Image (cartoon, rainbow, N blue to C red):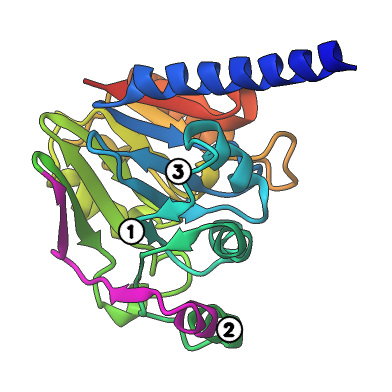
Amino acid sequence: MKRGVLLIVLLILIILGLECIGQMQIKGNLVVVFCDVGQGDGALIKTPKGQDILVDVGPDSKILKCISSYLPFWDRKIDLIILSHFNTDHVAGLIDILSRYKVERIAVSTLNTDREDVGRYMQLIRTKNIILDDLNKNDTYKIEQDLTIKTFGPNDEKYLIEDNNASLVQMLTYKDFDVVFTGDASFEVLNPILDGLGNDIEILKVPHHGSKTGLNEGSFRNFHPKVAVISSGKGNRYGHPTKEILNLLQENKIQVRRTDKEGSVRFVVD
């Protein structure tokens, strides 16, 4: 009996030790994980000084598995959640997150949010006494030294504003490393933004899970990321990512990473 208890204790200590080693390996670095949430978007950012940030939270509880893979079990705080827009595949995981974690701050765009479902999410946020930020173009979070998140869109041109085009378009910059988050925005909204970012960008989160509405030839006139990450569900009914987008990325010699093929996609930056 005692031997069995000792073995269980030893096993727990080994598991905890492995978890601590894993945390030490990424401590002090920027870690960006495009989580495998199925047909949706959800990304986890761990900052060099230990802040935890989410950009979108997926369609359901799958985001919790990704979070728990990178946060130690005793860490139950999320510093910031940025919701690109309120479509279910980007926001529904919020309900599960708020039941498991204390969230300090949530950022949204309130353009085109006059909907009943959006009202329910906003009410949930308020009942949890979470700080709520309404982001607009050029708003910038100075997260830590050398680490910022700047909002480039949406703009307020009403003819462009529908659910997907109301997505926040943002760039995370850490030293000389950049990640562009695009939500579900279309090339009509994105191209003027991308055109101004230049060709020294490391990662593009491909808009709308690789839908053909997200990018076109004009997207890469001056903009040329090294890696494009596509977040989509395996065998999804929408046919994402589309052949048009995959061919476009290949023609522009951009490396493609896909959550439907690889699972969660992780980048670690010194």
Task: Report the front residue among 80 and 196.
Answer: 80
Q: Residue at x 37, y 60 (%)?
A: 82
Residue 211 seen by the camera: no
Residue that mark 3 sits on: 43
Q: Are marks 1 and 3 in contact (CB under 8 Å)?
A: no
Mark 1 residue element: helix
Q: Position of residue 55 (x, y in %)?
A: 41, 52
Q: Residue at x 54, y 58 (%)?
A: 90
Whether 94 is among the magenta residues is: no
Task: Report the front residue among 126 and 148.
Answer: 126
Calculate the distance from the C-alpha at mark 1 to the C-alpha at mark 2.
30 Å
Residue that mark 1 sits on: 188
- Is the N terminus in the top left, top right, bottom left or bottom right quadrant? top right
Residue 231 vs 109, above or below: the answer is: above
Residue 254 vs 46, above or below: the answer is: above
Whether 133 is among the magenta residues is: yes
Give the class, few, some or many, for how many residues have Cα within 10 Å of label 2's Cα (few <14, many ≥20).
Answer: few
Residue that mark 2 sits on: 120
Q: Residue at x 40, y 56 (%)?
A: 186
